[in-house]
Image (cartoon, rainbow, N blue to C red):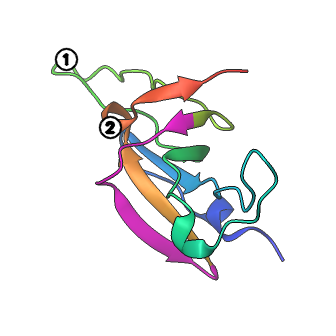
């Protein structure tokens, strides 16, 4: 089965991301119950729109690229479900930062 997000093309300066899953174990190796897990504010960029246009009609380049791990705001964005997977859509300017290795 093909990944459903590959059929989705964001418009303008929108970015399709999927939140990264929280670890099920603590640093010390203790299994955490679902209630103790904090929601991750990290996500993987899966698709990008072409970018927004300035007043002159020129396309402003996006600040991220597909495959980047980004920090997203705790609130905001648009939740969508494609087949069985959940994704979020943010504007390029809403992305807080990019995590590098």
Q: Considering only vertical position in the picture, is 52 above or below 78?
A: above
Badge number at residue 86: none
Question: At numbered mark 1, what does the secondary structure look like: helix, strand or loop?
Answer: loop
Q: Which badge, 2 or 1, is on the more N-terminal residue? A: 1
Q: Considering only vertical position in the picture, is 43 above or below 2?
A: above
State the image coordinates of residue 45 (x, y, percent, origin top left): 59, 43
Mark 2–mark 1 Cα distance, whole angstroms, equals: 23 Å
Q: Residue at x 39, y 31 (%)?
A: 96
Where's the C terminus, which quadrant? top right
Frontmost residue, 59 versus 35: 35
State the image coordinates of residue 15 (x, y, percent, origin top left): 46, 45
Answer with the quarter of the image where residue 21 lies.
bottom right
73 in magenta: yes
Q: Nearer the viewer, mark 2 or mark 1?
A: 2
Where's the N terminus, which quadrant? bottom right
- Mark 1 neighbour class, 10 Å CA radius: few under 14, some 14 to 19, many 20 or more: few
Answer with the quarter of the image where residue 18 lies.
bottom right
Relative side of 32 to 52, left or right: right
Answer with the quarter of the image where residue 76 lies.
bottom left
State the image coordinates of residue 71 (x, y, percent, origin top left): 48, 36
Q: Residue at x 68, y 66 (%)?
A: 32
Badge number at residue 94: 2
Relative side of 42 to 27, left or right: left
The answer to the question of whether label 2 and label 1 lie on touching residues, with beta carbons closer than 8 A, is no
Frontmost residue, 68 versus 24: 24
Number of marks present in the image shown: 2
Frontmost residue, 8 versus 37: 37
59 in magenta: no
Q: Residue at x 52, y 73 (%)?
A: 35
State the image coordinates of residue 17 (x, y, percent, origin top left): 54, 51
Q: Which residue is mark 1?
A: 56
Q: Which residues are magenta?
A: 70-84
């Amino acid at each position: 089965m093909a990944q459903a997000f590959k059929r989705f093309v964001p418009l303008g300066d929108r970015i399709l991301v999927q939140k990264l899953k929280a670890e099920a174990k603590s640093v010390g190796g203790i299994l955490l119950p679902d209630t103790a897990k904090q929601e991750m504010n990290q996500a993987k960029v899966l698709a990008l729109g072409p970018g927004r246009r300035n007043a002159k009609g020129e396309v402003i380049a996006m600040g991220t690229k597909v495959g980047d791990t980004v920090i997203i705001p705790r609130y905001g964005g648009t939740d969508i479900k494609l087949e069985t997977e959940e994704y979020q859509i943010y504007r390029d300017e809403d992305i807080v930062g990019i995590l590098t290795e």
